[in-house]
Amino acid sequence: MSHPGEDHLLSTITTTPFEAEHLRSDETIEVRLRGELDVAAGPELWSCLAPVLEAGGVHLRTLVLDLSALDFMDAAGLGVIMRLANKLRSTGGSICIRSPRPLVRRVLDLTDVGQVLHVEPEPV
């Protein structure tokens, strides 16, 4: 039995070399990404998360993407993140990108994602 405020593992998807683990706690979903978010993994991430965001309805306020274990991200992966952000924004929610590694941070910086989404610092 679950209790309010308790984290709930929603699902894990794995596509070599990509893995995503989703946890939900009240109004927040945290997604921990590992490996490479690219043209092959992006559609799986979208198909896994889009229904979760829809099911969250008005109660889902924040999607946190933990990128501390993401080694690589291409334009297709970034496109999925922006689609997720737009979907969440349309229901009054927001997205936060947590701890991107230097290579992923470079992609975010080159595309000015920090101007649109909240990006926390990389791990120390």
Image (cartoon, grey):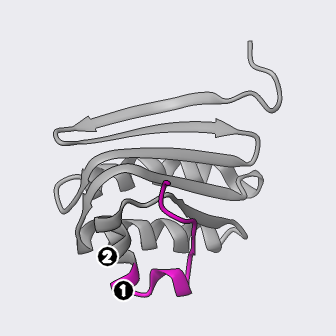
Which range is magenta? 109-124
Per the rendering, the mark at residue 34 is none
Residue type for callout 1: Thr
Q: Does 117 appear in magenta?
A: yes
Q: Which residue is mark 1?
A: 111
State the image coordinates of residue 55 (x, y, percent, origin top left): 62, 47
- Horizontal side of 92 relative to 85 (left or right) equals right
Answer whether labels 1 and 2 touch (C-beta < 8 Å).
Answer: yes
Give the camera-side residue of 71 and 8.
71
Number of marks in picture:
2
Callout 2: SS: helix
Mark 1 to mark 2: distance in Å? Answer: 6 Å
Q: Does 79 appear in magenta?
A: no
Q: Residue at x 61, y 46 (%)?
A: 29
- Horizontal side of 120 relative to 77 (left or right) equals right
State the image coordinates of residue 73 (x, y, percent, origin top left): 26, 64
Q: Residue at x 50, y 49 (%)?
A: 51
Give the camera-side residue of 120 and 1.
120
Q: Residue furthest front?
A: 124
State the image coordinates of residue 104 (x, y, percent, origin top left): 33, 66
- The 10 Å Cα crowd at callout 1, few under 14, some 14 to 19, many 20 or more, is few
Per the rendering, the mark at residue 107 is 2
Q: Residue furthest top?
A: 1
